């Protein structure tokens, strides 16, 4: 499985929703989550991709310890959490550090601990509950191959958009 560059926007354990301004590279506080939930993993995006929602492809990175917003991490995709929200399809690729032996045993979504999968699913089912006009529909899990396809589609979509 290939490795990719992920940029972390939100560290695990944060209620702050940060966004990177892709023109300036600056990290901005978008909002504090309206619910009392915290992100269950580090959250970010894959560089040089464009997802179906018009933003870079999202990634949840499983790490021992959270990192700072703006930090790059070489990751290996292991699955995808499928969901949609008020803006459309918004799937989250799940990835682990590419060369960290502590994560070598995680190779597909089924090897992610069941408790962590439940926490991710619960978080995304409810993190927008108190935000007016926002909603989320969770749609289950996909394989490492599905995740790889989402990333490759994102690379292709960005190249096509850039050519116009």
Image (tube, grey):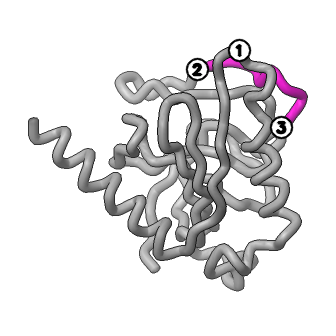
Cα separation, mark 3 vs mark 1, equals 19 Å
Pointer 3 residue = 38
Marking on residue 132: 1
- Residue 101 visible, this angle: no
Residue 161: x %, y % from top left: 19, 39
Q: Label 3: few (<14), some or many (≥20) within 10 Å?
A: some
Q: In the visual, does 94 lie left or right of 67?
A: left
Whichever of labels 3 and 1 marks the residue nearer the N terminus, that label is 3
Q: In the visual, does 129 lie left or right of 88?
A: right
Whichever of labels 3 and 2 marks the residue nearer the N terminus, that label is 2
Is 110 magenta? The answer is no
Q: Quadrant of residue 15?
A: top right
Residue 37: x %, y % from top left: 86, 35
Is 36 magenta? The answer is yes
Residue 61: x %, y % from top left: 65, 57
- Numbered disc 1: secondary structure: loop
Instruction: Give the residues in magenta.
Output: 29-37
Disc 3 vs disc 2: which is toward the camera? 3
- Residue positioned 50% across, 24% down in the render: 26
Q: Quadrant of residue 78?
A: bottom right
- Numbered disc 3: secondary structure: loop
Pointer 2 residue = 28
Cα separation, mark 2 vs mark 1, equals 22 Å
Disc 2 vs disc 1: which is toward the camera? 1
Q: In the visual, does 153 lie left or right of 35?
A: left
């Amino acid at each position: 499985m290939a490795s990719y560059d992920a940029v972390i926007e939100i560290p695990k354990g944060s209620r702050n929703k940060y966004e990177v301004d892709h023109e300036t590279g600056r990290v901005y506080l978008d909002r504090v989550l309206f619910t009392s939930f915290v992100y269950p993993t580090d959250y970010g995006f894959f560089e040089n991709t464009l997802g179906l929602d018009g933003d870079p492809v999202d990634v949840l990175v499983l790490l021992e310890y959270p990192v700072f917003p703006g930090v790059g991490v070489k990751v290996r995709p292991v699955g995808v959490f499928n969901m949609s929200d008020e803006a459309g399809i918004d799937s989250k690729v799940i990835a682990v550090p590419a060369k960290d032996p502590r994560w070598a045993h995680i190779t597909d979504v089924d090897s992610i601990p069941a408790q962590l999968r439940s926490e991710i699913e619960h978080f995304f089912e409810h993190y927008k509950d108190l935000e007016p006009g926002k909603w989320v529909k969770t749609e289950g899990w996909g394989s490492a191959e599905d995740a790889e396809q989402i990333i490759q589609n994102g690379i292709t979509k960005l190249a096509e958009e850039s050519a116009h």
